């Protein structure tokens, strides 16, 4: 049996176990996916815990907030996608070695292409942690013309700016003094913070700033509809939900876990089932 885990904080409402276990059953794959909730903020403790899992009976794991950057120290090797982003959301044991991948990157590209035929344009990205990093590189490859970055920790913005310095993209370091200005003039606004999650409710910005933008994305998917996406919908702005990122990154992770590629019909069935369970 393939043993999989989800490592993170505040994950009790995650749809990951249901997605992977249901999809595995439909493909007659012997797989068990369980939650592995942690509370530590210590990178060394995370590393030790991860190594204990993989030295035991665990074959693969997803990694979510707030560990996507820290978990790299537990990997024996880092796939190019995770190396480029400097964050991982998927770990797979191969030849008794832990390999780190990033399916947030690939999952967002798939989700965005299904959502919108146009390029992203000028965007503002809120939150420069693990998922924000991955999505920035997705935006580069999707043809965004400018990425304005904001995080409450300026050091995270500076780090991501440096990581993007070799890419063909203009970046702007935002702070509280110019955040509203750039958001109001953006084509797209992306929430990659945990604000809006059931454990950290709220809206990451003043909702009145959402008026003329073309599209928004919210990485939060529990709940499925957030204050951020409600404000966008009221302003007739197109919304790409966090569920779409969850769904496509999960499918990419499943293929890494199992080596199997689900059919479109199987994925559509899982998607319908998953959406019906969300708040």
Image: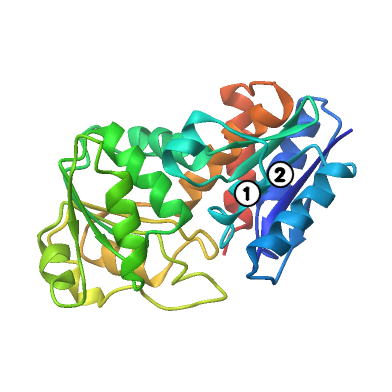
Q: Is residue 62 above or below residue 46?
A: above
Q: Residue 55: where, in percent of width, then height? A: 86, 43
Q: Secondary structure at mark 1?
A: helix
Horizontal side of 195 relative to 23 (left or right) equals left
Pointer 1 residue: 73
Q: Residue at x 89, y 41 (%)?
A: 57
Instruction: Compare marks 2 and 1 and give the one earlier in the sequence.
Output: 2
- Residue 217 visible, this orientation: yes
Q: Residue 109: where, in percent of width, then height? A: 39, 35
Pointer 2 residue: 61
* Circle 2 residues within 10 Å: few <14, some 14–19, many ≥20: many
* Marks 2, 1: nearer the viewer: 1
Find residue 208 and report its image quarter: bottom left
Q: Secondary structure at mark 2?
A: strand
Find residue 35 and report its image quarter: bottom right
Of the pair 202 and 237, the residue shown nearer to us: 202
Q: Residue 156: where, in percent of width, then height? A: 36, 62
* Circle 1 residues within 10 Å: few <14, some 14–19, many ≥20: some
Q: Is residue 205 above or below residue 123?
A: below
- Residue 241 visible, this orientation: no
**Image quadrant occupied by the C terminus:** bottom right
Cα gap from disc 2 to disc 1, whole angstroms: 15 Å
Q: Is residue 62 above or below residue 24?
A: below
Q: Residue at x 53, y 38 (%)?
A: 103
Of the pair 146 and 250, the residue shown nearer to us: 146
Q: Residue 45: where, in percent of width, then height? A: 72, 63
């Amino acid at each position: 049996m393939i043993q999989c885990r989800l490592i993170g904080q505040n994950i009790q409402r995650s749809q990951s176990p249901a997605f992977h276990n249901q999809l595995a059953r439909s493909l007659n794959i012997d797989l068990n996916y369980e939650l592995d909730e942690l509370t530590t903020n210590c990178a060394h403790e995370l590393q030790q815990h991860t190594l204990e899992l993989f030295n035991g009976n665990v074959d693969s794991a997803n990694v979510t907030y707030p560990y996507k950057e820290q978990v790299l120290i537990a990997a024996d090797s880092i796939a190019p996608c995770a190396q480029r982003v400097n964050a991982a959301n998927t770990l797979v044991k191969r030849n008794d070695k832990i390999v780190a991948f990033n399916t947030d990157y690939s999952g967002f590209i798939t989700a965005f292409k299904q959502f919108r035929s146009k390029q992203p344009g000028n965007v503002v990205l809120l939150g420069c942690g693990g998922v924000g990093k991955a999505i920035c590189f997705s935006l580069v490859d999707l043809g965004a013309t400018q990425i304005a970055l904001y995080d409450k920790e300026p050091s995270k913005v500076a780090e991501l700016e440096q990581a993007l310095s070799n890419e063909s993209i203009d970046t702007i370091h935002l702070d509280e003094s110019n955040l509203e200005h750039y958001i109001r003039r953006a084509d797209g606004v992306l929430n990659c913070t945990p604000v809006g999650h059931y454990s950290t409710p709220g809206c990451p910005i003043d909702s009145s700033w959402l008026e003329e933008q073309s599209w928004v994305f919210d990485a939060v998917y529990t709940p499925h509809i957030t204050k951020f996406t409600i404000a966008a919908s009221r302003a007739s702005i197109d919304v790409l939900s966090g569920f779409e990122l969850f769904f496509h990154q999960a499918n990419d992770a499943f293929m890494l876990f199992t080596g199997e590629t689900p059919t479109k019909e199987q994925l559509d069935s899982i998607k319908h089932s998953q959406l019906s369970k969300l708040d």
